[in-house]
Amino acid sequence: MNVVFVEPFFPANQRKFARALADAGATVIGIGEYPVESFDDQLKSCLYHYEQVPSVTDVEAMTRAVRWVQDKLWVDRLEATVEAHTLPAAQVREACTIPGTSVRTAWLCRDKPSMKEALRSAGVPTAASAAVSTAAQAHAFAETAGFPLVLKPRSAAGASGTVRVDDMAALDRALGVFGGQGVDSIAVEEFVEGHEGFYDTVAVDGQVALDFASHYYPNVLEAMRARWISPQFVSTNRIDTAPDYAELREMGRRVISALGIGTSATHMEWFFGPKGLKFSEIGCRPPGVGAWDLYSAGNDIDLYREWANAIVHGGTSTAPSRRFASGIVALRPDRDGHITGYSGADELQQRHGEWVIDAHLPPPGTPTQGVEAGYMANAYVRMRHPDYDTLRGMLDDVGRALHVYAQ
């Protein structure tokens, strides 16, 4: 099978997808923005051919590149695994008549108001939402739905650009910020109270072949706005045995069906609280922040290879073992600037070392990144343990005891 893979070089984990496709037996043609001279030998060995384009979100340039490839050999699939690339990739597929995720499906997975309208029509419980392009429309929604509300760009990934507002004055301030950024339409949603997590799948022909459930501690909006918090997310190994996950898995199947997802990775966000289980949003692509690495470490599986098997061979070959729960705790510097050092690492290694998957502790002198940059922006530790609750306790211990200093 000949597979065009979009942007194999950046971000760095893209190379894992290119490697997996090659290992699964695909002839991999890379198209990306970076010169091939930037690639290491391992990435070069995975690619049969590489085409550089000015931007992988430029549909015309991408279409020209893919048609050039099609003049040389048959293209069976075109795959993209970065959120911002999914809709342009679908448009190129349509222009070049390549099977895969459709423009309609990619659009519904990117545009949050349209997504939720489609899912509500299919009976999937979601927060009330609307697309608004004027202050009057936002005010009208607020008067109907009440506060608090959440505002976000219509096609943002995760919590990027997301703002919570608790009254009309805060709403107007947020609208001013979006207007100053040149945003002409945003998604406004009812704020859903409750615990937040995510549900990830590899689907084959519209059916879930592999799935994983993870939990945020605390919820993302809080985690990305408070420096003192060492946030974590944890993948459970109880998804097959705890009955509470049955409703989540059924919701995931209904979402995949309603949005017309065929063979693809998916990343779904959800809330559970006083109003029950509520769907938040979906990406028709793998999750970010190394979640697949955690799933692989916890389940004796190479999830990248299983995704590639789904693309190349039409199915997966290995079931998750559910042997370990696995998780990450993010460690924030005490201030912005440059990292100067750490404390507590040696003691934690003695207490929990056998359960550590890996740790990222940037050397002194490394510039810090803001807390809003995410779970892997500065320092982090990833761990696994057979017991979910024990793992949670160890991650809490790391978050309390391992300090990152900066000046």
Image: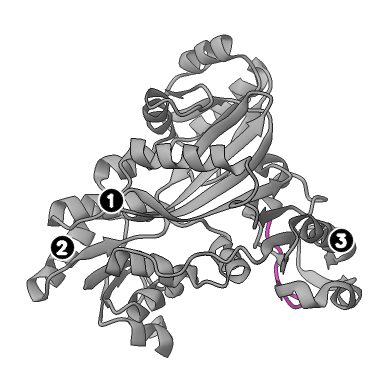
Residue type (three-letter) at the residue carrying disc 1: Thr
Seen in the image, is 205 located left or right of residue 127?
A: left
Q: How many marks?
A: 3
Residue 402: where, in percent of width, then height?
Answer: 86, 66
Who is closer to the viewer here, 348 or 393?
A: 393
Where disc 3 sits, the SS reads helix
Q: Which residues are magenta?
A: 359-370
Q: Is residue 130 left or right of residue 322?
A: left
Instruction: Tell me the distance, in whole angstroms, between the alpha carbons under discs 2 and 1.
Output: 19 Å
Say whether disc 3 or disc 2 marks the residue closer to the N-terminus: 2
Q: Quadrant of the C terminus?
A: bottom right
Q: Which residue is mark 1?
A: 101
Q: Going by the image, does 186 lie left or right of 241?
A: left
| Pointer 2 residue | 64
Relative to 302, say whether 266 is above or below: above
Circle 1: is it few (<14), some (14-19), or many (20+) Cα within 10 Å?
many
Identified by mark 2, the residue type is Arg
Q: Earlier in the sequence, mark 3 or mark 1?
A: 1
**Identity, as a three-letter code, of the amino acid under mark 3:** Asp
Q: Secondary structure at mark 2?
A: helix
For residue 364, which quarter of the picture?
A: bottom right
What percent of the width, then of the height, locates residue 105? 31, 42
Q: Which labelled disc corresponds to residue 260?
A: none
